[in-house]
Image (cartoon, helix red, strand yellow):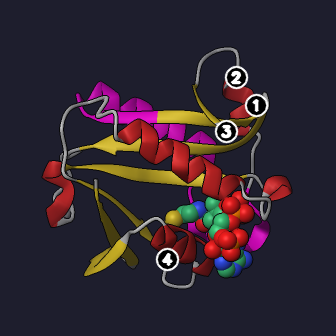
Amino acid sequence: MELRKINNDNIWDIVKLKVADPQIHFVASNANSIIEAFGVRESGYTALPFGLYENDTPVGFVMIGYGSIGDDEEPSVVSDSYCIWRFMIDRRYQGRGFGKAAMEKTLEYIRTYPCGKAKYCWLSYEPENIAAKTLYSKFGFRETGELDGDEIIAVLTL
Ligand SMILES: CC(C)(COP(=O)(O)OP(=O)(O)OC[C@H]1O[C@@H](n2cnc3c(N)ncnc32)[C@H](O)[C@@H]1OP(=O)(O)O)[C@@H](O)C(=O)NCCC(=O)NCCS
């Protein structure tokens, strides 16, 4: 599993990746996430979108944030943290261990502190998203009791 930067060569391959219909409300489309990354970066904040590749096949998408993006209602942990902002494996490739491999690589990358030091990594998920909740908890993410909208916030100490 490999994180690859999104550029002219691969952007449309990554936009084509989709979750299963019952999962649509768990995560934004990759196109919307990439558009959001553009806006966030133009505003001077950090958003790092990557394609997830297994043996040269695009199988998923991850977007990493760092620190605040200037929103009023950010969780208390943001100032000293990275965020796994979007994370998905295409419906055709789920259930084969790619989510686990992708999370391993994502955390390995975050622990190189590409944007600067931080103590935590945080993320959030819908309460009914059992697959995500189980996966994240296996990597040590712990729920803080805070919510981001209706999503549960979980934090990992890096
Ligand atoms: C969550 C997601 C990324 C998992 O990817 P995946 O490739 O299917 O996951 P893996 O095959 O690597 O499984 C990893 C672990 O996740 C958990 N998991 C995966 N699917 C699960 C399910 N249907 N029910 C419960 N746990 C599940 C298990 O703990 C599994 O570990 P195990 O195989 O040792 O039991 C994928 O389901 C997905 O893209 N969902 C839609 C988008 C989404 O919800 N993103 C997260 C937004 S917060």
Residue behind mark 4: 126
Span colored in magenta = 19-48
- The response on whether ligand 1 sits within 8 Å of label 4 is yes
Mark positioned earlier in the residue sequence (3 or 1): 3
- The response on whether ligand 1 sits within 8 Å of label 3 is no
Give the Cα distance between marks 3 and 1: 16 Å
Badge 4: how crowded within 10 Å, few (<14), some, or many (20+)? some
**What's the residue type where badge 3 is placed?**
Met
Q: Nearer the viewer, residue 79 or 38?
A: 79
Give percent across and percent down for residue 129.
Answer: 58, 78
Give the Cα distance between marks 2 and 4: 29 Å
Q: In the drawing, does residue 57 fall left or right of residue 61?
A: right
Instruction: Report ligand 1 position as a quadrant.
Output: bottom right
Mark positioned earlier in the residue sequence (2 or 3): 3
147 over 156 or under it: above or below = below
Give percent across and percent down for residue 96.
Answer: 80, 59
| Residue 57 placement: quadrant | top right
Residue behind mark 1: 13
